[in-house]
């Protein structure tokens, strides 16, 4: 029973990431966009 608890916890974490895959994708896109803007700003400055 002690081993089952961490495994179920991992499964729940996995489910959480699968459900929020779209949100993570959007956050990644925004991060890359902001990073590119910062790099261009540094190059021009």
Image: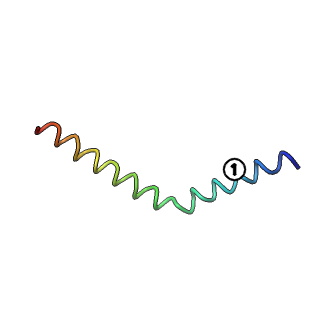
Point out residue 19 in the picture as x, y percentages from the top left corner: 56, 63
The residue carrying pointer 1 sits among few (fewer than 14), some (14 to 19) or many (20 or more) residues within 10 Å by Cα, namely: few
Return the residue at label 1: 10
Q: Secondary structure at mark 1?
A: helix
Above/below status of 8 relative to 36: below
Seen in the image, is 26 located left or right of residue 43?
right
Q: How is the image coloured?
A: rainbow
Point out residue 27 in the picture as x, y percentages from the top left corner: 40, 55
Q: Quadrant of residue 44?
A: top left
The residue that appears at 28% across and 49% down in the rendered structure is 34
Point out residue 37 in the picture as x, y percentages from the top left corner: 22, 47
The residue that appears at 75% across and 54% down in the rendered structure is 8
Seen in the image, is 16 located left or right of residue 30?
right
Q: Residue furthest left?
A: 44
Q: Quadrant of residue 13?
A: bottom right
Point out residue 9 in the picture as x, y percentages from the top left corner: 72, 52
The residue that appears at 46% across and 61% down in the rendered structure is 23
Q: Residue furthest right?
A: 1
The residue that appears at 29% across and 44% down in the rendered structure is 35
Above/below status of 14 relative to 35: below
Seen in the image, is 27 located left or right of residue 40?
right
Q: Residue furthest front?
A: 45
């Amino acid at each position: 029973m002690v081993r089952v608890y961490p495994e179920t916890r991992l499964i729940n974490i996995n489910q959480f990431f699968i459900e929020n895959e779209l949100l993570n994708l959007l956050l990644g896109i925004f991060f890359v966009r902001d990073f590119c803007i910062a790099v261009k700003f540094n190059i021009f400055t």
